[in-house]
Amino acid sequence: MAWLKIVFVVYLGLSLSCDTSTFEAPDDQTALAWTSRVLQGSGLKVDPEQLKTLDALDHFHLDAVLRRYMTENGGDYLALSRDPEALNLLSDYKLILDGVRPESMRNPDERIAFWLNAYIGLLLDSIAGLVQEFGPDVEVSHDDFAIYTQVQHRVAGFKLTLEEIGHIVLRGHLGYPDVADTPTDLARNLMEQHHLLFPNGQFDPRINFAISFGARGFPGMPVRAYHADRLEETLHQRTQDFINDETYGANGLGVSALFEWFRRDFIAAAGSVDEFIRQYRSADKGSFNVSGKLLFDWSLR
């Protein structure tokens, strides 16, 4: 359990700051009870109320798991699913995610990193569960994409699905089919979170390349947790890497289905899908064909 203890010790180094925001996420008492349980269980005396006023979160738990099991070439989900310490880290991270209130963070990039990491951490935990039950050959599309659309998680006091994090909080797209049935009150609160990420009203479509489905056809899992101080560099690199991936990103036969699913984001940012891709496409990669669609692979990456 050594690396788990180290993570908890480092966690004490988080900077704390109160914010004057009057925003209150629902069900605070439940969240505080959960976070109190994990912090008390670690043997460290930490006031769970501090989680609600964090100005920054370093995501040490998630970072430790990503560093151990994710590489540029993919993840070792089978080993992750068999590692009780790593699974404990993810379990504890989920409790912390529920206790934190991103609206207390003054830097929008800290909020973006929080929600991106929440998505990745919850997805890792979900995939590990799939692999435990069905083996390493399971596809993320199992049971009609249940881990994205049906399983609910507690984050920032909300009870929501991965799709609601991805499409409402991060993308601000209430009209996306997978979130069409989101309760009105929840949708409104999640849109408030979205506006806190992009206070100038301009969504950054590179967020679509920071999210991962854990599938071969999608951008890969990050190898480290997202951090505000290098978010710009990371978003640029992940966007560039995927667009120049000639197997799953873009080539002379077509482009990823991602460019169709999130078409409105790229058009809003660059005027057209072609122009957005062109901004990140390396000259030596040759032409690409936005009229064609590359076959999407749902197997684990």
Image (tube, helix red, strand yellow):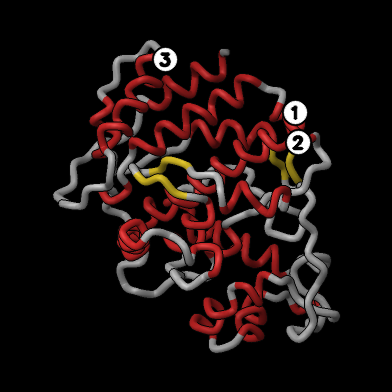
Amino acid bearing label 1: Ala
Q: Nearer the viewer, residue 28 or 255?
A: 28
Q: Residue tagged by mark 2? A: 76
> Which amino acid is tagged 3?
Ser
Residue 70, position as x, y percentages in the image: 69, 40
- Say whether marks 2 and 1 touch (CB < 8 Å): yes
* Quadrant hosting residue 8: top left
Is 98 in front, or is 102?
98
Residue 80's place in the image compared with 197, above or below, is above
Q: Is residue 301 visible?
A: no
**SS assignment at label 2:** loop
Residue 178 visible in the picture: yes
Residue type (three-letter) at the residue carrying disc 2: Asp
**From this viewpoint, which residue is outermost toward the top?**
43
Indicate left or right for 193 with 89 as reference.
left
- In the rendered image, which residue does mark 3 sit on? 42
Dot placed on the residue nearer the N-terminal end, 3 or 2: 3
The reply to whether dot 3 and dot 2 touch (C-beta < 8 Å) is no
First in residue order: circle 3 vs circle 1: 3
Q: Nearer the viewer, residue 11 or 282?
A: 11
Q: Position of residue 299 (x, y in %)?
A: 79, 51
